[in-house]
Image: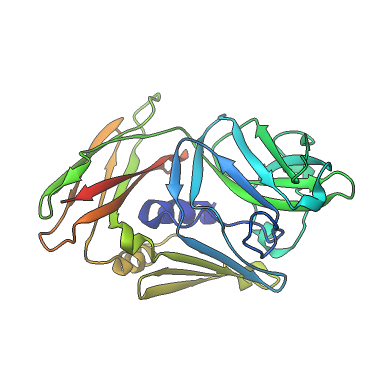
C-alpha cells in the first residue's frame, strides 16, 4: 500500500511513475523486433522517459502515452512480438501488482492473484502480433502478461493502473502569462461525503520533456533505487518508498519556476483550483495534470490536458 500511495502522489505531481514494467521485455526499443504490450484507452497521460536496470535487463519504455482505466472498464491492447512468433498460441493474464515482479525475468504471474481466471487465449498473426481485451477489476495496480502457451514463457509484461472512476477537468484552453487559471475538477457521484485530496500541476511541455524516472534493482526489494529527475534536478529513493512530507517537499523543490501547483481537501463532488502564472513565463504549450485521491478508496481519478500560455 505504501508503494501505491507514493505512485499516486508522483502521478499527481509529475505523471512519471506508472511505467514500472516487469523486466521480461527485451532491451531492444525497436517495436518490430522486441516483445512489447501496448495498452489502449481514451484517458491517457504523456509518458516521460522511463528506464529500468537490473542484472538481467536494461531498457527504456517505448510508448509516448499511457492509459488510465476506471473500475471494471475493459483493458484492451496489443501484443507486439517478433516475426518468429508468427502463428504461435499465447495467453494473456492480469494479476495484482507486486514489487517482486521487478526482481525476476520471465516470471509467470501467480495464478492465485489473477483477475481473469486462467488467462485469455490469443493467436499471434503473421507478424507475431495480437489484439486482446480483458475484463477490468477494482481500482489498483495490475500486471498484464503475455505467456507463450507452448513453453509457458512470459513474452512481455506491462503495468495497468485502474482508478475508481474518471474525473473531468474544465478549464480555458489559453491563459495569459501573469493571469490565474481556474480549473474545475469533477469526480464521479458517490454516496456519503468522504473527504478527498484534489491536486493539479501545470508545467511547460519543454520542462516536461526533461522528466525522467529510473528504476534500478539487484535481487532484493531493499536494493530498489528510484531516481526522479526533472531538468538538472534529481533525487533518489532507496528501498520501498513511503509517503512523507519530506519526500513531497523534495519533489516540489525540483519543479521549475515556470510551473504551478494547487491542492485542496474537500468532500464535494466538484472543486475549483486556482493555478497562478507569472508574467515572466515563456509562451507556449503547458501540460496540465490533475488527480483526486481518497485515503479510504485510493485513486479516484487521474486526467491530463494541455493549455497554451499566451
Report whether residue 240 is seen. no
Q: Residue 233's quadrant in the figure?
A: bottom left
Q: Which coloring applies here? A: rainbow
Q: Residue 94's quadrant in the figure?
A: top right
Give the number of marks.
Answer: 0
Task: Tell me: residue 186, above or below residue 200.
Answer: above
Report whether residue 301 is seen. yes
Q: Position of residue 41 (x, y in %)?
A: 51, 37
In front here: 213 or 226?
213
Task: Tell me: residue 24, above or below residue 228.
Answer: above
Identify the residue shown where x is 39% and y is 28%: 188
Q: Position of residue 130 (x, y in %)?
A: 71, 39
Farthest-out residue, front: 126
Q: Position of residue 26 (x, y in %)?
A: 70, 62
Identify the residue shown where x is 29% and y is 69%: 253
Q: Position of residue 33 (x, y in %)?
A: 70, 57
Identify the residue shown where x is 32% and y is 69%: 254
Q: Residue 196's quadrant in the figure?
A: top left
Amino acid at each position: 500500500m505504501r508503494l501505491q500511495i507514493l505512485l499516486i502522489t508522483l502521478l499527481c505531481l509529475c505523471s512519471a511513475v506508472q511505467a514500472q514494467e516487469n523486466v521480461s521485455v527485451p532491451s531492444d526499443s525497436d517495436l518490430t523486433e522486441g516483445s512489447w504490450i501496448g495498452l489502449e484507452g481514451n484517458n491517457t497521460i504523456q509518458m516521460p522517459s522511463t528506464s529500468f536496470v537490473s542484472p538481467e535487463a536494461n531498457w527504456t519504455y517505448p510508448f509516448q502515452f499511457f492509459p488510465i482505466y476506471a473500475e471494471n472498464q475493459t483493458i484492451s491492447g496489443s501484443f507486439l512480438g517478433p516475426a518468429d512468433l508468427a502463428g504461435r498460441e499465447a495467453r494473456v493474464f492480469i494479476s495484482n501488482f507486486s514489487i517482486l515482479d521487478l526482481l525476476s525475468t520471465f516470471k509467470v504471474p501467480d495464478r492465485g492473484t489473477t483477475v481473469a481466471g486462467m488467462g485469455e487465449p490469443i493467436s499471434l498473426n503473421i507478424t507475431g502480433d495480437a489484439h486482446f481485451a480483458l475484463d477490468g477489476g477494482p481500482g489498483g495496480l495490475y500486471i498484464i502478461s503475455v505467456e507463450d502457451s507452448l513453453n509457458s514463457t512470459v513474452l512481455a509484461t506491462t503495468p495497468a493502473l485502474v482508478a475508481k472512476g474518471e474525473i473531468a477537468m474544465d478549464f480555458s484552453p489559453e491563459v495569459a502569462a501573469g493571469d490565474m487559471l481556474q480549473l474545475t475538477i469533477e469526480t464521479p457521484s458517490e454516496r456519503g461525503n468522504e473527504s478527498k485530496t484534489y491536486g493539479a500541476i501545470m508545467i511547460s511541455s519543454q520542462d516536461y520533456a526533461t522528466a525522467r524516472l529510473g528504476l534500478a534493482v539487484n535481487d532484493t526489494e531493499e536494493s530498489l533505487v528510484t531516481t526522479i529527475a526533472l531538468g538538472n534536478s534529481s533525487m533518489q529513493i532507496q528501498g520501498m518508498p513511503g509517503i512523507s512530507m519530506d519526500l513531497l517537499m523534495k519533489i516540489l523543490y525540483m519543479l521549475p519556476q515556470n510551473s504551478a501547483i494547487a491542492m485542496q481537501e474537500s468532500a464535494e463532488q466538484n472543486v475549483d483550483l486556482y493555478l497562478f502564472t507569472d508574467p515572466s513565463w515563456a509562451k507556449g504549450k503547458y501540460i496540465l495534470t490533475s488527480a483526486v485521491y481518497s485515503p479510504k478508496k485510493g485513486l479516484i481519478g487521474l486526467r491530463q490536458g494541455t493549455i497554451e500560455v499566451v
